[in-house]
Every structure is written in structure tokens, then in C-alpha cells.
Image (cartoon, rainbow, N blue to C red):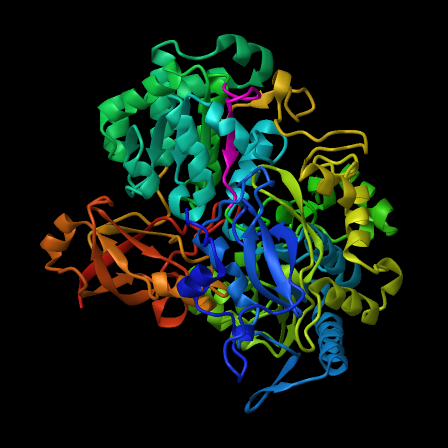
């Protein structure tokens, strides 16, 4: 965690002066009329509280917000520097229209008129589903709800999805299957109460630094920390037990741990009998996963597998937390279910210090998937194929059930359909698939084949450069709204400044598009709070119920956990207390999971595993963080982590350029020699674009349930370049 600057001089020394501090007459130390705005960081799902310092219509700095209970004023390196993007020279200040010689400035009337004209033309000629919509997973809840409503009411297209499809959807699907609802079961404040914390495929030290403090607080009071990862990440270096699993073998590892718990009689039969369904089938299925058999599959020593079971069994309280390392697989849902089986079999859920959760990677990865911008989901976490759910939402929106589209294509499937010529038009909001989707050559071919592409963004991302029209949208601090954090806490974002130039707030752009499409009567919003009120009413009675929330209530309580069905309800920080789950019978479900290999395993031609992930100073596709100088200075380019043993065998020296080849293409990067990775695996961070993008060579295979790509494992050949 970064140490906060304690003075303005230190701030300037560390990050340089803010652009507005450098008038022609010299350095102006302090503008007039400074004020502080309490809001939240724009990056990961922890959503740390921060006070943005504002003067003369600009965000010029920050102060700690020590009252906010999640981070108590602490910030990571991204949070400390996040305000520096506001006056970046790349900021889009007005709409753009493509011409034969590049982009030119356009008026809002011209740009919006062209978007509407092309939507109508494409849908009239090719059908409603020939136009698709894609949103980001850092949008506010209000914008996510509005985007889903726009797609289904104004465009009546089934094909809307979001880039959380590249992040948490395997966990979302597994949570619903096992528990009946999709949310982390516990608040982060339960972590220090656990006496065993198991972290699976989550590099919390770099990706969610503030959560590291919670883990260390547990450790400081006697908790044992177990880390499962192919890499010895920073958090793994402080663990009591590190399980260096071979990429793509997680479900086998957890079958082995559960099998050992069964053999030692360390399961909670009373809990299983009273609160679950399906354990006996799972018990029979894992019986073959002896420590030696599991070692052969996973590469984790048998003694370590047994020790992991011992640490979990001996602890009176325990929590299991996971992230993308477990989920980014063609069997991501199965991987997650295998960890849930372990939690349920030992009754470690629904109690203080006992639970399970997904550490959410994107800014609104939780809320962004709750209210209808996902292809298979309607507001309130309702299932788009459930007749009762469809009828409820149709009635609320004032349409017939038959007018609501059915489930459409997921994000990757949308691009495959574009490449096949089935989808002709696309509207996107704050999503950068040219960097974030695997096999980037296919993504580029799809974008080039579109008849029309309109993008709403605040920077000209690598994807927006392919657009026919770019609509200048808003940064988080330029709008009001809410975000739902990874622990299920709904928090308030407050507008600090207005959008610069002729840029507009995103939701106002969407409302104007709806009006021009002839649906002004169904999109009558004058402020973001109007949207939130409607969102809450739409979710009322659904699996994900915000019905009792309001901006005032959220601000007063520094966040409210859902479900919160009534105004007098306090919210629900801890789910499943008393052992009742969200399935109709109140019981959780075990699921039989049998290990199967990844879609692309190593072979003679491609003998090594390639896995990908983040670094501490960058965020997602880097569209924001690559424009923040101090963050880019920390990691200006990607690299390939190689174990010294592998490097010696391949004749590769530290810093030498290395050629990585997969069945999709090649990439050249400098070698970083480290013993913190398995000798059969190489690692590349994914935040860069163009020739530096590792997603040029990653695999596009999808989980059959969640439709998430297998970012975390593919076969690669490595050689000195």
C-alpha cells in the first residue's frame, strides 16, 4: 500500500505539478476556493473512499477519507494517482466523426443523428438483433441499468453484454448454482475474524492492495494463510502454505483437499444434513483424488495437499476468497464450484469469520452484472428466460412480455457473430475489447467488418479508434451515481467537476439516443437519482433487491449492503446466517466436479504454459492508467516472467528479448528471470495494446456456462529472440 503524501510539496515531488498549476507566469501554489468531495476510487471492486480536492472546476489532488470503513484513508498506488487523468491532453472534448482522412469534430446533433440513423437502417435491413450493445463493468449501477433498458426497449435487441464477461461471470454462475444468489457471502470485515484464510488465484497484493491489510490483520491474530497460485505472488511470500498449482488444474486440487477432509472425518455432517443437497454424490466423486493422484495432476506436492486440509480443518473459523486465476478458464464455473464444495462440506459459511467470496476485479463488477446489461439477465438479478421474471420486468417497463428480447450473445460471441457477418452494427460504452479480448486479430477483423460502430468514451481507446462516431463521455468524477463493491456494499459516487469542453455525462447521451429513437416517454430522467429510484423499484422483489435504498440512506450509513428490500431494512452485510440459502427450499447445492484439462494443453510443439494477469500500477486494458505518468513509469512495458531453470535450458539471459509463439501468433518481450513462477509456466501482464498486447496470442475458448475466455492458460513456445 502506498504511503500517502503528507504535504502539497511532497505530492508535487512525487507526482509532478497538476497541469492547472502551471500558468505562464510561473507556478501557482494554491488556487482559490478549494473544496473536498467525498467519493470513491475509479478502479477495482474494493472502491476505496477518497476525498477529491477540487478548485476552479478541476480535480487538483486528494485527501484521505478516514471515516469510510473499508480503507480508512489508505490507498494503493493507483488510488493515490487516479486524479491525474482529469486534465490529460488526450481527453475527448467533443464528438468525432470518421472521414476518409481521419476523425473530424462533429456537433452533438450530427453525431447523435448519425448513430440513430444507422441503428434504424441496420435493423430495418437485417433485423433487430443485427445491432449489438456492449458496456463496461466500471459503469455506475444507474448507467448499467439504463444501458440494458435502452437495448431492450429502444433497440429491442437481444445482443447486449458487458466486459464483466471477461472477469467475474464464472463466479456469478457458480454462486447462483450453489447458493441461489450471486454475491460474496461476507463483508471484508469478516476476514480478520478467520483463523484460516485461503486465497485462490488472487494476487491481492497487486490487484487489491487494500484487502491485503485485512489478510494481514487475520494473520496477526493467529490465522494461517494458504495461497493457491502458479506464481509466488507478494501475498504468497507471506503465506503459511503456498500451493503452486499447475495452470488449469484447480478443480483437481480442491477435489484432493476435500477428499482428504472426508478421509479424516473433518466435515460438518450436521450442517450438510440440515442445509445442503447433493453431498453424497460429491463425496463419491472425490474419493479417487488421493494425495498422490492429485499431486500427479496438479504439480502440488502430496504433503502440501494434506497440510492444506489440516490447516482448514483445525481452524475454528475460515474464509475462502478467489479471483480471476480460478475463474478465467473453460471450466471456470467448475473450478469455483469445487471451492464452494469445500466451504459447504465444512459448514464454513453464514457466520462471523466463516465464509466465501469473489474478489471483484472491475470497479463495478458486482453491480454491473446485477441490473440488466448482461445478455442473460434483467434488473434485480432476474433470469431473462424465466417467464415470471420476464413478466415482472415487462410490467414494470410498460411493455408486453413478448416485446422483451430473449437471451442474446455474450461479449466474445458478439464479436464472433460480427466476424461471421451476422451482427452489422455496434454501440459501446467504456469498453476496450481490442486490448481485453483474447486473440486480438479476430477482434480487429470483426471491428473492420462492421457496417457501423459508435463508441462512447472519455479517451480514444484502441477500440474507439475503429469507430465511425465517437461520443465524448464522462469520467467517474463527472457524474453522480452508485457502485456496488465486491462485498455487496452499495456506495455513492459524487460529482466533483463537470465534463470538460463539449463532453457530456454518459447517461444523458443514452437518454438522448432513446428519445431520438422514439422512446422519450420511457426514458424521462432529469438526474442520476431518478435512475437510481427506478432501478431500486425495478429490483424490488427480485433475487438482488435494492428496494429499500436511497441516496440519502446510502450516504448516512456509508454504504448499504443488499438485499435491502424495505426503507426500514438495515441491509445485509453477511448472507446465509442461520443456514438458509436463496434457493426455494433454502438449501445450498453441492455439485459434482471431475477434473478435465484446459482447452489447449501443452504438447510437443508448444511445451509451456502461458498465463496472464495484472501488475500493481495498471488497470484492465490500461486506457486510463497508461495515461497517468507516475503509474506508467512503474511499469512502462510488459515483460515475460521466466524461472531461471527454464531460462538456462532455453539459453535466455535476464533482460534479453524473448519470442513467445502460440497458435494465434507471436509476441516479443524482455525476459524477467524470477523464481516466483513454476518452471513450466511463463507469465505476461495484459494492460498494453498493439505489439505489446499479450491478448494477441491468448486463447478464445470459452467456458460453456459462463462464456468466459480461458485467459489463464494456453500452450506456448518460448525461445531467445
Decide if residue 342 is on the left or right side of residue 667: right
Residue 43 vs residue 525, the one in the foreground? 43
Is residue 561 visible from the viewing direction of this image? yes
* Residue at 57% across, 60% down: 414
* Residue at 83% across, 47% down: 394
Locate residue 559: give its quadrant.
top right
Where is residue 291? Give x, y as percent.
Answer: 26, 22
Residue 207 vs residue 589, the one in the foreground? 207
Q: Is residue 471 above or below residue 349?
A: below
Decide if residue 532 is on the left or right side of residue 252: right
Residue 412 vs residue 485, the one in the foreground? 485
Locate residue 98: give its quadrant.
bottom right
Q: In this view, does 297 lie above or below 590?
A: below
Locate residue 92: give its quadrant.
bottom right
Which region of the structure is painted magenta?
348-360
Q: Is residue 359 magenta?
A: yes
Decide if residue 424 is on the left or right side of residue 353: right
Residue 376 vs residue 456, the one in the foreground? 456
Quadrant of the image containing the C terminus: bottom left
Q: Is residue 225 above or below residue 163?
A: above
Where is residue 329? Give x, y as percent.
Answer: 42, 45
Is residue 386 visible from the viewing direction of this image? no
Where is residue 487? Give x, y as percent.
Answer: 57, 37
Q: Does the magenta stretch include residue 83?
A: no
Where is residue 668? Give x, y as percent.
Answer: 26, 67
Q: In this view, does 195 lie above or below 235?
A: above
Amino acid at each position: 500500500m502506498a504511503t500517502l503524501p503528507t504535504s502539497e510539496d511532497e505530492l508535487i515531488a512525487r507526482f509532478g505539478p497538476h497541469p492547472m498549476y502551471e500558468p505562464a507566469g510561473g507556478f501557482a501554489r494554491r488556487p482559490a476556493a478549494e473544496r473536498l468531495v467525498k467519493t470513491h476510487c475509479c478502479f477495482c471492486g474494493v472502491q476505496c473512499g477518497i476525498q477529491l480536492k477540487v478548485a476552479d472546476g478541476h480535480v487538483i489532488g486528494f485527501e484521505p477519507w478516514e471515516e469510510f470503513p473499508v480503507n480508512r484513508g489508505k490507498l494503493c498506488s493507483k488510488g493515490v494517482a487516479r486524479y491525474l487523468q482529469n486534465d490529460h491532453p488526450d481527453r475527448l472534448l467533443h464528438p468525432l466523426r470518421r472521414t476518409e482522412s481521419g476523425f473530424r469534430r462533429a456537433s452533438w446533433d450530427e453525431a447523435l443523428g448519425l448513430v440513430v440513423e444507422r441503428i434504424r437502417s441496420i435493423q430495418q435491413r437485417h433485423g433487430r438483433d443485427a445491432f449489438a450493445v456492449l458496456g463496461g463493468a466500471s459503469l455506475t449501477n444507474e448507467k448499467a441499468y439504463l444501458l440494458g433498458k435502452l437495448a431492450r426497449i429502444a433497440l429491442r435487441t437481444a445482443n447486449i453484454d458487458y466486459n464483466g464477461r471477461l472477469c467475474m461471470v464464472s463466479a456469478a454462475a457458480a454462486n447462483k448454482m450453489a447458493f441461489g444468489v450471486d454475491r460474496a457471502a461476507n463483508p471484508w470485515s469478516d476476514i480478520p475474524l478467520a483463523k484460516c484464510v485461503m486465497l485462490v488465484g488472487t494476487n491481492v497484493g497487486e490487484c487489491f492492495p487494500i484487502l491485503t491489510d485485512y489478510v494481514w490483520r487475520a494473520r496477526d491474530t493467529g490465522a494461517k494463510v494458504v495461497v493457491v497460485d502458479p506464481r509466488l505472488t507478494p501475498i504468497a511470500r507471506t503465506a503459511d502454505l503456498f500451493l503452486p498449482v499447475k495452470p488449469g488444474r484447480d478443480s483437481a486440487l480442491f477435489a484432493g483437499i476435500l477428499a482428504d477432509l472426508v478421509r479424516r472425518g473433518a466435515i460438518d455432517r450436521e450442517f450438510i444434513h440440515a442445509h445442503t443437497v447433493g453431498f453424497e454424490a460429491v463425496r463419491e466423486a472425490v474419493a479417487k483424488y488421493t494425495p498422490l493422484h492429485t499431486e500427479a495432476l496438479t504439480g502440488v506436492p502430496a504433503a502440501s495437499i494434506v497440510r492444506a486440509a489440516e490447516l482448514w480443518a483445525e481452524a475454528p473459523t475460515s474464509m475462502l476468497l478467489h479471483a480471476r486465476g480460478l475463474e478465467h478458464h473453460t471450466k471456470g464455473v467448475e473450478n469455483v464450484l469445487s471451492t464452494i464444495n469445500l466451504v459447504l462440506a465444512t459448514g464454513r459459511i453464514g457466520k462471523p469469520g466463516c465464509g466465501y467470496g469473489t474478489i471483484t476485479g472491475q470497479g463495478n463488477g458486482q453491480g454491473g452484472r446485477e441490473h440488466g446489461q448482461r445478455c442473460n439477465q434483467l434488473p434485480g438479478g432476474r433470469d431473462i428466460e424465466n417467464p415470471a421474471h420476464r413478466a415482472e420486468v415487462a410490467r414494470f417497463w410498460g411493455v408486453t412480455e413478448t416485446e422483451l428480447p430473449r437471451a442474446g450473445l455474450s461479449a466474445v460471441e458478439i464479436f464472433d457473430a460480427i466476424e461471421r457477418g451476422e451482427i452489422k452494427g455496434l454501440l459501446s460504452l467504456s469498453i476496450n475489447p481490442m486490448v481485453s479480448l483474447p486473440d486480438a486479430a479476430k477482434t480487429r477483423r470483426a471491428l473492420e467488418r462492421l457496417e457501423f460502430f459508435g463508441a462512447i468514451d472519455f479517451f480514444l481507446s484502441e477500440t474507439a479508434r475503429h469507430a465511425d462516431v465517437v461520443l465524448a463521455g464522462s469520467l467517474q468524477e463527472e457524474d453522480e451515481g452508485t457502485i456496488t463493491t465486491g462485498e455487496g456494499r452499495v456506495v455513492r459516487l459524487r460529482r466533483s467537476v463537470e465534463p470538460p469542453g463539449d463532453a457530456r455525462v454518459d447517461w444523458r447521451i443514452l437518454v438522448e439516443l432513446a428519445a431520438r429513437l422514439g422512446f422519450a416517454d420511457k426514458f424521462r430522467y432529469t438526474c442520476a437519482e431518478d435512475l437510481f429510484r427506478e432501478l431500486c423499484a425495478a429490483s424490488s422483489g427480485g433475487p438482488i433487491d435494492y428496494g429499500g435504498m436511497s441516496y440519502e440512506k446510502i450516504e448516512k450509513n456509508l454504504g448499504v449492503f443488499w438485499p435491502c428490500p424495505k426503507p426500514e431494512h438495515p441491509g445485509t452485510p453477511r448472507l446465509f446466517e442461520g443456514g438458509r440459502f436463496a434457493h426455494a427450499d433454502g438449501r445450498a447445492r453441492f455439485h459434482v466436479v471431475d477434473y478435465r484439462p484446459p482447452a489447449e494443453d501443452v504438447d510437443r510443439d508448444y511445451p509451456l504454459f502461458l498465463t496472464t494477469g495484472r501488475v500493481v500500477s495498471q488497470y484492465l486494458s490500461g486506457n486510463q492508467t497508461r495515461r497517468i505518468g507516475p503509474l506508467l513509469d512503474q511499469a512502462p512495458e510488459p515483460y515475460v516472467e521466466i524461472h531461471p531453470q527454464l531460462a538456462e535450458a532455453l539459453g535466455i539471459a535476464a533482460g534479453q528479448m524473448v519470442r513467445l509463439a502460440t497458435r494465434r501468433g507471436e509476441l516479443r518481450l524482455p525476459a524477467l528471470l524470477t523464481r516466483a513462477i513454476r518452471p513450466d509456466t511463463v507469465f505476461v501482464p495484459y494492460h498494453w495494446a498493439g505489439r505489446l498486447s499479450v491478448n494477441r496470442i491468448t486463447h478464445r475458448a470459452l467456458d460453456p456456462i459462463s462464456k468466459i475466455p480461458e485467459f489463464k492458460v494456453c500452450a506456448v513456445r518460448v525461445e531467445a529472440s
